[in-house]
Image (cartoon, rainbow, N blue to C red):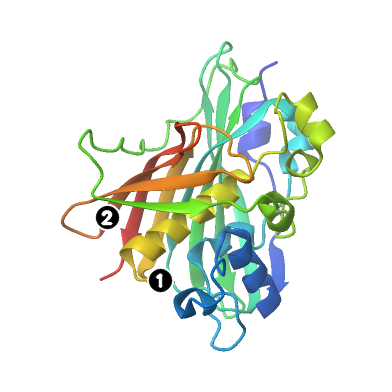
Amino acid sequence: MPLDYQTIKNWQFADIHHRYEDKDTILYALGIGLGADPMDAAQLRYVYEQDLQTIPTLATVLAHPGFWMNDPRAGIDWVRLVHGEQRLQLHAPLPANGTVIGKSRVTHVIDKGADKGALVVTERTLHDDQGQHLATLQQVTFCRGDGGFGQGDEALPPLPATPARAADRSCQLSIAPNAALLYRLNADRNPLHADPAVASKAGYPRPILHGLCTYGMAAHAIIKTCCDYDAARLTGLNARFSSPVFPGETLQCDIWQDAGNTLQFIVRAIDRDVVVMSHGTATLSQ
């Protein structure tokens, strides 16, 4: 049934104060495949506490407001939710440890029609305990059973499709068979990513990888291929999720790089030849 626009648009979120340590930063990096070669010093800086550095997409697991859409007051058919897009802009480097404050709000509730559903855009800003604005995140959730409420906001500016020409660069990364079991320790313990019985009931042959893990692996591929493992150069990352990913697969990130500081990319599961992430853009500092 349709959701209530006013209820969702005016949803109240408490500020989240999130204290994290070096081990949390390291666990995140390991979860997206850093450190697969323990002799690679360029990767080691993200998984070893000496002079530890952060991957910018760590922001996605910091000060998260939790799974608020399953609150009965929301009136959302949460079983049918799909994570549609993730957008991230970094305003300052994330420290390797410290306290961040997350402030969340719903910015858009978009009616796609009773036969299609609704889009809900949740914005989260991260600040350090001195008030510095570190990052802005936008999560687009597709509520497949909740359209037709007859009002709503304008859509976000669409992410651009990648060029028709061949990619300029490509990077392949293997997903460890236990990647979902490792990544879920960051923030998302949904049994869909761990329990074969739950995955089967959801229509999958085995547990699937977290979408935000695939997103982090896309960041890893770009940092490796275009930044010589200098993660601080990645200041923005936007993408659309288009298909599930399974642990044990190999991902290929195809990258288009024109003049300027913006890249475009897609991510494919090469064994199945399936695009799993599309309409990707990444912004690099000079």
Task: Report x, y in % for residue 82.
Answer: 61, 32
Q: Nearer the viewer, mark 1 or mark 2?
A: 1
Q: Identify residue type, mark 1.
A: Tyr
Are the residues tagged 1 and 2 within 8 Å (C-beta)? no
The part of the image, by quadrant, that contains residue 183 is bottom right
Helix, strand, or loop for circle 1? Answer: loop
Residues under labels 1 and 2: Cα distance?
17 Å
Secondary structure of residue under mark 2: strand
Q: Residue at x 31, y 38 (%)?
A: 160
Q: Which residue is mark 1?
A: 229
Image point (56%, 43%), residue name: 249
User: Disc 1 or 2, which lies upstream in sequence?
Assistant: 1
Q: How many marks?
A: 2
Q: Is residue 271 left or right of residue 80?
A: left
Residue 262 marker: 2
Q: Nearer the viewer, residue 176 or 228?
A: 176
Q: Quadrant of residue 78?
A: top right
Residue type at the position of mark 2: Thr
